Image (cartoon, rainbow, N blue to C red):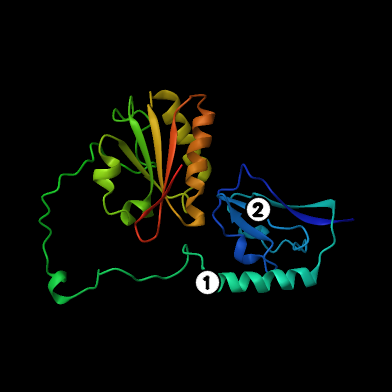
């Protein structure tokens, strides 16, 4: 055992955005269950190249008693990581095209004439815009949607919005603390019956579930919470 600098992660502050992961040349950091995790202290060189990438300040360097940095182990780890990444890349940043939504001269001229009825029963729908005392919130089933998920899931209105009060938020590019404060107030002053969270499968989106769970905890309310994970192709991948 040696005493040296080692990366420390404040899990309460971490939103799982994943910004720190590509900055670690040794592959010591990964997003696991929506949080940044140190894979092995053997892989961390203690130089802190990842520090400036965290928007929440969740990363720090502390001198601790730990194992020595093992460059050979890092090389072997990176070799395996490279092979794995060739098979499964991070869909959060990958450019994908699929399906039948190909632009043509015909569908560019189409005027929408849908006879489907919107299930939306209030406005505004963005968390940063809606009042914490909006009448649609009290005694409601709240649906917190990551904005990408709203576009990805094709039957959003019929399957999720019907009978619920939806709020849209981006867990990656909007301020975590501001969103946490507002959601906490919404839960505290309204009689929310239950909460559903709809988020994408990409790492930066997992922080939305933790944001909502923390807001419920902060409000001192006992509100049932259910999470739905949507794949980048619009399929429902997991319910928890």
Comparing 235 with 203, the one in front is 235
Tag 2 secondary structure: strand
Name the residue located 60 percent from the left edge and 48 percent from the top edge.
Answer: 14
Q: Is residue 118 above or below residue 231?
A: above
Image depth: mark 2 or mark 1 in front? 1
Residue, disc 1: 87
Q: Quarter-wise, where is residue 75 in the image? A: bottom right
Q: Give the position of the N terminus as an image quadrant.
A: bottom right
Residue 189: x, y in percent? 42, 24
Residue 31: x, y in percent? 59, 55
Of the residues under marks 2 and 1, which one precedes in the sequence?
Answer: 2
Q: How many marks?
A: 2
Position of residue 16 in the picture relative to residue 168 (left or right): right
Counting other residues with Cα less than 10 Å from the Cα at mark 2, is it few (<14), some (14-19), or many (20 or more)? many
Q: Would you say the residues marked 2 and 1 are in contact, meaning their CB atoms lie under 8 Å apart?
A: no
Counting other residues with Cα less than 10 Å from the Cα at mark 1, is it few (<14), some (14-19), or many (20 or more)? few
Q: Is residue 182 visible?
A: yes
Comparing 13 with 199, the one in front is 199
Residue 237: x, y in percent? 41, 52
Tag 1 secondary structure: helix
Badge number at residue 37: 2
Name the residue located 79 percent from the left edge and 71 percent from the top edge.
Answer: 71
Q: Is residue 124 visible?
A: no
Q: Is residue 235 above or below residue 109?
A: above
Badge number at residue 51: none
Q: Quarter-wise, where is residue 46 in the image? A: bottom right
Q: Quarter-wise, where is residue 164 in the image? A: top left
Name the residue located 35 percent from the left edge and 71 percent from the top edge.
Answer: 97
Comparing 128 with 203, the one in front is 203
Residue 41: x, y in percent? 77, 57
């Amino acid at each position: 055992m040696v005493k040296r600098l080692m990366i420390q992660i404040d899990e309460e502050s971490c939103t799982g955005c994943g910004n720190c992961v590509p900055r670690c040349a040794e592959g010591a950091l990964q997003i696991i269950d929506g949080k940044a995790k140190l894979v092995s202290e053997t892989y961390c060189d203690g130089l802190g190249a990842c520090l400036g990438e965290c928007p929440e300040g969740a990363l720090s360097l502390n001198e601790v008693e730990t194992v020595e940095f093992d460059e050979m182990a890092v090389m072997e780890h990176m070799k395996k990581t490279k092979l794995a990444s060739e098979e499964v890349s991070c869909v959060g940043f990958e450019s994908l095209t699929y399906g039948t939504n190909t632009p043509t001269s015909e569908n560019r001229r189409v005027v929408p004439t849908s006879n489907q009825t919107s299930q939306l029963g209030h406005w505004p729908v963005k968390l940063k815009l809606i009042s914490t005392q909006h009448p649609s919130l009290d005694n409601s089933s709240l649906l917190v949607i990551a904005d990408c998920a709203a576009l990805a899931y094709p039957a959003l209105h019929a399957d999720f919005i019907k009978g619920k009060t939806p709020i849209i938020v981006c867990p990656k590019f909007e301020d975590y603390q501001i969103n946490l404060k507002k959601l906490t107030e919404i839960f505290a002053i309204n009689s929310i019956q239950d909460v559903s969270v709809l988020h994408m499968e990409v790492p930066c989106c997992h922080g939305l579930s933790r944001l909502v769970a923390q807001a419920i905890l902060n409000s001192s309310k006992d509100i049932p919470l259910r999470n739905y994970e949507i794949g980048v192709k619009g399929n429902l991948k997991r319910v928890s």
